[in-house]
Image (cartoon, rainbow, N blue to C red):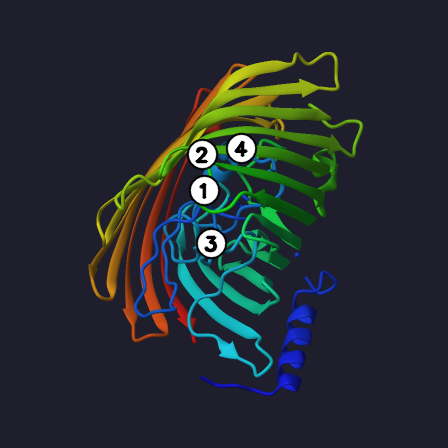
């Protein structure tokens, strides 16, 4: 392991900050900055190769302005359908800090740096997500990542940068340059009291076809500073545990302003969760979460609103084979505009993992939640279900198969969309530092309004390097 001098560490940190500075930078998609972690496989202790569900990064701040319907059409855009370019499995004991993978560069002052890079090449046969006049194109993607970690005085702190740059050979107007810069800390005050916090800056874009705004010639680019904090009180194994969480996100669009100005929004979230242990590895969970969406433009529709969710459920880690959490309750949508009726609807969130073998896992995720309109209807209700199977066939060979369905009901208009997603991928590790893979994803949206139907197939080959 190479151990540079302290001066070199300082230079590297400064350089990292300059690279990710908003003055130099620009889904999903899938918030949705933090994708739900899935199973990971490892060629060696400390390596963190993994397959992950959802988009490559989920937006912190509980972005109710982006729903599952929007996220469902972005497979391939962020290399998040079945690829190896996903969120990272959280480090053991981490609350909100980032996780590096591979072997770190260790500096003499205790700083660890985890660099990695992924290169992808493939083909997207429907870049714009349209029913007619489809445009296909080869796609190049580069995803550099750098995580800097330091542990001191009972705390863990990280500074991380994640880039995602894509170029379409036949449709350069759809090129994207995404950036995420995060500074985060996990503080452990006592065995009972813990605090995680994060400050970030995000630059992304909504690919064409992923919203119901007027279609433009290029993706809608946006940026957002984000802050988040999560406080936990309750020791591991205690009868009761309390969590309080808050976040703020200021989302601003940069182009196509004739249509995107009304989507500029400030999102403030506050939530509380209480866990009550009823069995050694099973707890009841009660949660109240409210998100206030304050739109900058007075012409925004549906405009300012609050999204309150009240849940009761169960979380368990009953055996080495089964873990999960299920929350069931109501979602209340309240609008400042008196012409839009407030709503109350059934809502749930659930994740279940079954590991019949140490090298094989099945992940089932399901949710039913409301989201703000992106141009059609007063708001939408998304019902999403996905099933993913990760399997390790040999020491260095693994696969991933996934299937998902998103049902989107538009209120105020006669429209309903069903979006199906399928994916399959195979990966092999070449030595300790390189992983190659090939992925295929298919998206098929069927709408009651025929012009909104579309199909998309994406094939990608990837190679990822770590130290």
Question: In the rendered view, would you say 419 is above or below 392?
Answer: above
In the rendered image, residue 199, in percent from the top left (x then y), is placed at: 67, 54
* 3D distance between C-alphas at marks 2 and 4: 46 Å
Mark 1 or 4: in front is 4
Residue at mark 2 = 131
Q: Residue at x 43, y 45 (%)?
A: 75
Q: Quadrant of residue 434?
A: bottom left
* 3D distance between C-alphas at marks 3 and 2: 31 Å
Q: Earlier in the sequence, mark 4 or mark 3?
A: 3
Mark 2 or 4: in front is 4
In the rendered view of the protein, which quadrant contains the C terminus?
bottom left
Residue at mark 1 = 134
In the rendered image, residue 317, in percent from the top left (x then y), is placed at: 34, 41
Residue at mark 4 = 274
Q: Secondary structure at mark 2?
A: loop
* 3D distance between C-alphas at marks 1 and 4: 49 Å
Q: Nearer the viewer, residue 263 or 362?
A: 362
Pointer 1 and pointer 4: residues touching (CB < 8 Å)? no
Q: Label 3 neighbourhood size at 10 Å, few (<14), some (14-19), many (20+)?
A: many
Mark 4 or 3: in front is 4
Residue at mark 3 = 87
Q: Label 2 neighbourhood size at 10 Å, few (<14), some (14-19), many (20+)?
A: some
Q: Looking at the image, can residue 223 be seen? A: no
Residue 213 is labelled as none
* 3D distance between C-alphas at marks 4 and 3: 26 Å
In the rendered image, residue 237, in percent from the top left (x then y), is placed at: 43, 44
Q: Is residue 227 left or right of residue 345?
A: right
Q: Is residue 439 left or right of residue 207?
A: left
In the rendered view of the protein, which quadrant contains the N terminus?
bottom left
Q: Earlier in the sequence, mark 3 or mark 1?
A: 3
Query: How many numbered marks does the figure carry?
Result: 4
């Amino acid at each position: 392991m190479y151990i540079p001098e302290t001066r070199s560490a300082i230079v590297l940190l400064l350089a990292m900050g300059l690279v990710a500075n908003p003055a130099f930078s620009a889904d999903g998609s899938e918030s949705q900055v933090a994708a739900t972690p899935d199973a990971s496989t490892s060629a060696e202790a400390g390596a963190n190769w993994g397959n992950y569900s959802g988009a490559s990064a989920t937006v912190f701040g509980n972005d109710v302005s982006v729903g599952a319907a929007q996220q469902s059409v972005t497979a391939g855009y962020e290399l998040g359908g079945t690829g190896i370019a996903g969120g990272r499995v959280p480090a053991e004991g981490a609350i909100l800090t980032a996780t590096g993978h591979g072997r770190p560069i260790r500096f003499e002052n205790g700083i660890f740096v985890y660099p990695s890079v992924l290169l992808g090449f493939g083909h997207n046969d429907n870049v714009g997500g349209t029913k007619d006049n489809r445009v296909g194109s080869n796609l190049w993607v580069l995803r550099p990542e750098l995580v800097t970690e330091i542990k001191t005085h009972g705390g863990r702190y990280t500074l991380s940068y994640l880039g995602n740059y894509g170029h379409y050979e036949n449709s350069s107007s759809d090129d994207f340059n995404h950036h995420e810069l995060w500074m985060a800390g996990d503080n452990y005050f006592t065995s009972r009291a813990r605090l995680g916090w994060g400050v970030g800056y995000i630059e992304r874009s909504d690919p064409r076809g992923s919203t119901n705004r007027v279609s433009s010639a290029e993706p809608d680019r946006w940026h957002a500073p984000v802050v988040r904090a999560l406080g936990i009180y309750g020791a591991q194994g205690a009868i009761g545990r309390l969590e309080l969480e808050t976040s703020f996100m200021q989302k601003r669009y940069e182009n196509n302003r004739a249509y995107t100005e009304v989507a500029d929004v400030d999102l403030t979230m506050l939530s509380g969760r209480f866990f009550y242990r009823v069995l050694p590895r099973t707890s009841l969970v009660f949660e109240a979460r409210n998100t206030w969406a304050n739109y900058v433009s007075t012409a925004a529709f549906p405009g300012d609103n609050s999204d309150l969710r009240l849940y009761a459920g169960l979380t368990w880690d009953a055996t080495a084979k089964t873990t999960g959490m299920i929350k069931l309750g109501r979602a209340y949508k309240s609008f400042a505009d008196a012409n839009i009726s407030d709503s109350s609807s059934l809502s749930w969130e659930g994740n279940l993992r079954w590991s019949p073998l140490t090298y094989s896992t099945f992940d089932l995720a399901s949710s039913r939640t409301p989201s703000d309109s992106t141009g059609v209807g007063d708001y939408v209700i998304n019902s999403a279900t996905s099933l993913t199977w990760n399997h390790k066939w040999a020491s260095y060979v693994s696969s991933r198969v996934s299937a998902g369905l998103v049902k989107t009901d538009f209120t105020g208009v006669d429209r309903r969309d069903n979006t199906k997603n399928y994916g399959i991928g195979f990966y092999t590790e070449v030595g300790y530092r390189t992983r190659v893979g090939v992925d295929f994803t298919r998206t098929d949206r069927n709408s009651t309004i025929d012009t909104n139907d579309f199909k998309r197939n994406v094939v990608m080959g990837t190679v990822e390097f770590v130290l």
